[in-house]
Image: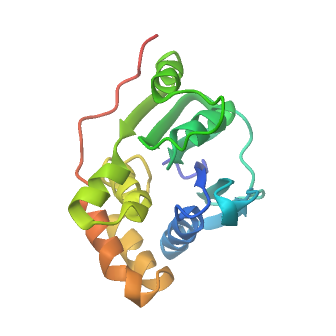
Amino acid sequence: MKKDKNFNIILCGVGGQGIITLLQVLAEAALLEGYDVRASELHGLSQRGGSVVAHLRFGKKVFSPLIMPGETDLILSLEITEGLRAASLAGETTTFVINKKLIPFQDGPTEEELIRKFKKMKERFQLIDASGICLEKLGKEVLAGTYLLSVAVLNDLIPLKTESILKAMKNKIAPQYLHSNEQAFALGKPSSPLAKEKA
């Protein structure tokens, strides 16, 4: 990340998936590295499974917590539909890291339809079955957010050090949940560089 440029992340999903915890961990990690940090939660009925969106910006100096359309560096979504909704703030270089988790609603799109829409975009995206992996490996689907965070950090999609993230987790996650989150983070492995999907 250039010293004079801020890094902008949108975290999205639904209530109960741990979006706010991820926001707190990332903000703490950025603070530990000496960045100026601004964050904002833009959510509705999060306690009832409603849409949850959080903006996080960090850099040398950040004046506003809200990310303007076209200025998003990374969209990390714990649910496919919410990831597509957040695409309205994406730009030509935005990277998407999306959990292959669909919470269906009446007359809503199917998983296949959503994936086709993503593939028509110019932005880079990676679809990962984080919920399935965490359920299989750790028995807890709710750890999908931490797993996706590890994928993003270990693939240099977020300009923060792994040790900063791990320290931030210790500072922000309750002791009884820390070990399982550390296990989920350890599952992430660097993958091949993301390539732009072509229509």
Image spot of residue 143 (x, y percent)? 39, 64
Q: Residue at x 56, y 61 (%)?
A: 19
Q: Is residue 189 above or below residue 177?
A: above
Residue 38 visible in the snapshot: no
- Of residue 110 and residue 41, the one placed in the foreground of this image is 110
Quadrant hosting residue 187: bottom left
* Residue 23 at x, y percent in the picture: 57, 65
Residue 108's place in the image compared with 72, above or below, is above
Q: How is the image coloured?
A: rainbow
Residue lying at the far top in this picture: please name it. 199
| Percent x, y of residue 69 | 72, 35
Res 125 seen here? yes
Q: Is residue 77 left or right of residue 179?
A: right
Question: Residue at position x 38%, y 50% from top?
Answer: 152
Q: Residue furthest bottom?
A: 175
Q: Quadrant of residue 75?
A: top right
Numbered marks: total:
0
In this view, the residue in front, 98 or 39, is 98
- Residue 71's place in the image compared with 164, above or below, is above
Q: Is residue 188 positioned above or below 109 on the image? A: below
**At x 52% / y 46%, what residue is drawn?**
77
Drawn side of residue 73 relative to residue 196, left or right: right
In the image, 39 versus 142, the foreground residue is 142
Please give the name of the residue rendered at 22% of the width and 52% of the height, measured from the top-left corner.
Answer: 189
